Image (cartoon, helix red, strand yellow):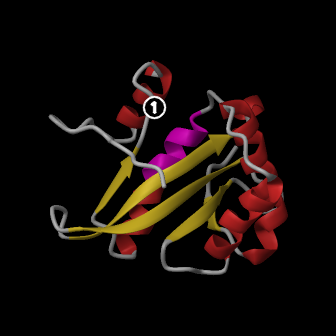
């Protein structure tokens, strides 16, 4: 099974939305369908703030990854943050997420991205191992903090 990445376009909205809904249900994220679709649609329309990639064949994707973009003086330019990554439960454990995470930086570097970040639960050792295999490392003396509005 291939973890090829396809930049999602407007005609992929229904397929992507179904995958995002599955991830949100699994992760316990309660979000009305209209709000979820409103958050996805601009990414597929090409806004400069982020991108959504389908994992696997675009007609029947097996997962997705969403990256948002920012700017970092420390890293010398545009950086990215993996907002969400999901692989269908039935195909997990086959290296698909690892392959996607290894090919994503190559695609983003070509667009000028200097660094890629992600958030992982402190108690999720499985995800931490996955991200470490893909080259992600914890930043010493730093951790993510959030303020909601």
Mark 1, residue position = 130
- The mark total stands at 1
The x, y position of residue 140, in whole percent, is: 16, 35
Quadrant that contains the N terminus:
top right
Give, as a single range, the part of the protein colored magenta.
95-102
In which quadrant of the rendered view does residue 131 lie? top left
Q: Measuring 45% from the left and 28% from the top, which residue is drawn there?
A: 121
16 sits left or right of 3 in the view:
right
Residue occupying the far front of the picture = 149
Please rate how many residues cluster around mark 1, counting C-alpha atoms within 10 Å: few if below 14, some from 14 to 19, many from 20: some
Residue 47 in the image: above or below residue 90: below
Q: Residue at x 42, y 67 (%)?
A: 69
Residue sitting nearer the eye, 7 or 79? 79
Specify the quadrant of the image occupied by residue 77: bottom left
Relative to 45, residue 118 above or below: above
Task: Kindly identify the residue that appears in the image at 71 percent across and 71 percent down.
Answer: 41
Q: Provide the secondary structure element on which disc 1 rests.
A: helix
The residue located at (47%, 57%) in the rendering is 104
């Amino acid at each position: 099974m291939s973890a090829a990445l396809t930049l999602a376009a407007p005609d992929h909205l229904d397929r992507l939305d179904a995958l995002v809904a599955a991830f949100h249900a699994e992760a316990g994220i309660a979000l009305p369908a209209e709000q979820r679709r409103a958050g996805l649609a601009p990414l597929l329309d090409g806004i400069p703030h982020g991108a959504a990639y389908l994992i696997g064949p675009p007609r029947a994707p097996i997962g997705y990854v969403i990256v948002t973009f920012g700017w970092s003086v420390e890293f010398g330019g545009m950086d990215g943050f993996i907002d969400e990554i999901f692989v269908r439960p039935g195909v997990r454990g086959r290296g698909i997420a690892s392959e996607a995470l290894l090919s994503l930086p190559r695609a983003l570097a070509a667009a000028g991205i200097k660094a890629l970040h992600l958030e992982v639960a402190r108690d999720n050792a499985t995800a931490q191992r996955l991200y470490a295999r893909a080259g992600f490392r914890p930043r010493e003396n730093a951790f993510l903090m959030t303020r909601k509005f």
